[in-house]
Image (cartoon, rainbow, N blue to C red):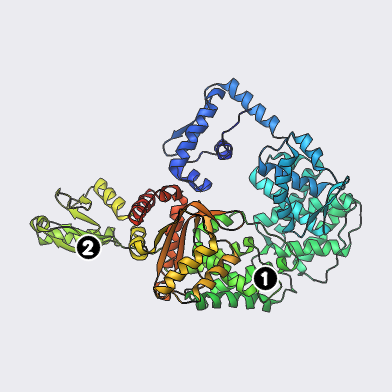
Amino acid sequence: MVRFPYKRLALLYRTLQAETLPQDELARRFSVSTRTVRTDIAALNETLLEHGAQFILQRGEGYVLSIQNEERFAQLTLSQQSSKALPRTAGERVQYLLMSFLTSAYAFKLQDLADSWYVNRAVLQIDMAEVRSHLAQYQLRIETRPHYGMKLIGRESAIRVCLSDLLCQLRREEASHPLLASDPDLASTSINFVSTLTRLLAHSTVRLSDDGFHFISQYCAVASKRISDGFPIEERTKEEVSHDIAAIVSELVAELKQITLCELSSAEQHFLAINIAARSIQGIMPDTINADDAEALVSYILDYINRHYHYDLRHDSRLRLDLLTHVKTMITRLRYQINLPNPVLTDIKQHYALAYDFTLSAVSSWAKHTAYQVSENEIGYLVLHIGVGLERHYQIAFVCRPQALLVCDMGNSTTRMIEAMLQRKFPQVLLSKSISQQDYYALDGVSDDFVISTQPLDNKGKPVIVLSPFPTEFQLEQLAKTVEINRAHPYMLDRYFDAKHFLRIDEPITQDALFQRLCAQLEQEGIVNEDFYPSVTEREAILSTIQGDGIAVPHSLGLLAKRSVVYTVLAPQGIAWGDGAVASVIFLLAISKEDYEEAMAIYDLFISLIRECASARLLECADFAEFKAAAIRSLKAH
């Protein structure tokens, strides 16, 4: 059996076995730089060398597994398959522990599991912290009795939903996961319900998302097993559902009766209907959902974003309708503590970083006036709608248009022809002026981003692109590469970052002490008022602002600064940032109302640094000049 030096290599190996992927896509999936991908591939190939296989990069396609010794590689595959029956990593142990608690009818001892998995009991005790945290999301807990063991305690409905979510997650990660086959009856029943649900939906106006479809199929299988084992749902509900959903439930209940040979209570039928309603899309909702609740929340979110962040989306009828459709089903889930997993939450946070912050602040403010607790997963789905709305109405990525100097000695008509061609093919380029070659050499320097010339020229510190009056495809490609360079990031660094607001801390410091120190300086300089520090701490209390790669972006709720500035802090020793996270590169963001639109580009700069795993490079900087140079190098790599 092959043992990889670190977990990411095992995941990389598994991913590349499933499909051929290029460097850029691997970097995106694993949230690392392309340089790290190349390093990982080299380490992976070194590990696989003795097993007769290598990953080869094929131009235009990606990394392909090349097997040089079929016999040795076949032995590796067999050893891997035989090793899958036992959990090896912490993540796998958590999944197996959850499965054990959710499917066991009796109490069991952790030591027995440790012995059967060939691990130390102390290791499982550490894993139990994550298990308890996961179960708490479903209002489930573990009861421990001396000499008796551990047993799961909670509502039957919550146990079923938690187990169904776990099985759906395992299927998304790996269709052949051993836990999915641990109960053959459950697996085959799930397949049967997939077929049944497909048939029912084909003749119904009810629509389910893919995740919703697989959850309901899995839930029905889980329900059949739990009912057969003597664990019915007893909690009563008073909700009524639409006629279309009731018709589907009637058919599913009939099949459940055939499988379990039991009569299903009204509580069973109602809970199944609620789960279908909670995962419905395209406006097919339970009739009894109070639309005023959904309308109020949608209006509250859009008003909050306009009032605190100055993005006015209140009159976007399409956005309002999309939000209303989603919020109605969301309220159903909140009422019955139905957890809806969001497999793309991390990607949403990165692609819609500012929209995520808007929505989180708005929903957190709304939650103060209601009993509902809105999870990160639910907020992530709302962010998708808000992010798309912002894209429709605002300039999401701040565009710093490239400025060029045209040097042409071929007469006025040729100059005008080139200018017209550039305007037609590259409308984003701003031509500052057109001068002769003699005038060019008389210049002390060039302030434009680059120079376009009909003849080769000496470089005056800026790139020179030679272009014929009738340019070749190659010349146009070279110009396109220069034009497409992202100039927004250097612009943002020049405008909002400075040496006065740069700090390197080599001694231990707490998060709150850091906030007090930075906010006090900004207040003393007249950049913010006294309400800025409390707002920063309040925002941090809602959810940690750490973004990844040890980079944190603390900020206030709303645009409270009089002048926009980014305070940069490098802390090589690290600062505890809540929930066990440690921040080493901190960007305290103070944005004014006047710069609200450029805030999106500032967030994009931070996300680019995270994607390039730039924190290690930035932490080596001793002063602001080194930091700025290192940041620009990282952003150019991005």
Residue holding disc 1: 328
Observer-nearest of 87 and 355? 87
Q: Position of residue 231 (x, y in %)?
A: 88, 54
Q: Indicate the position of residue 82 as horizontal and vertical percent values.
A: 70, 30
Q: Earlier in the sequence, mark 1 or mark 2?
A: 1
Question: Would you say 561 lies left or right of 495 here?
Answer: right
Residue 178 point in image, percent of width and height: 72, 38
Vertical comparison of 381 with 548: above or below? below
Quadrant where the N terminus sits is top right
Q: Residue at x 80, y 71 (%)?
A: 239
Please indicate, yes or no, whether residue 391 appears anywhere in the rendered image.
no
> Which quarter of the figure has residue 528?
bottom left
Q: State the image coordinates of residue 336 (x, y, percent, origin top left).
A: 76, 66
Q: Is residue 439 above or below residue 48?
A: below
Residue at point 42%, 39% (across, down) = 60
What's under tag 1, amino acid-wise? Answer: Lys
Taking the image as shown, residue 100 lies to the left or right of residue 528, namely right
Residue 431: image tag: 2
| Amino acid type assigned to the residue bearing label 2 in the image | Leu
Please tell me whether mark 2 sits on a helix, a strand or a loop: strand
Q: Is 228 in front, or is 361? A: 361
SS label for mark 1: helix
Q: Residue at x 70, y 46 (%)?
A: 127
Total number of numbered discs in the rendering = 2
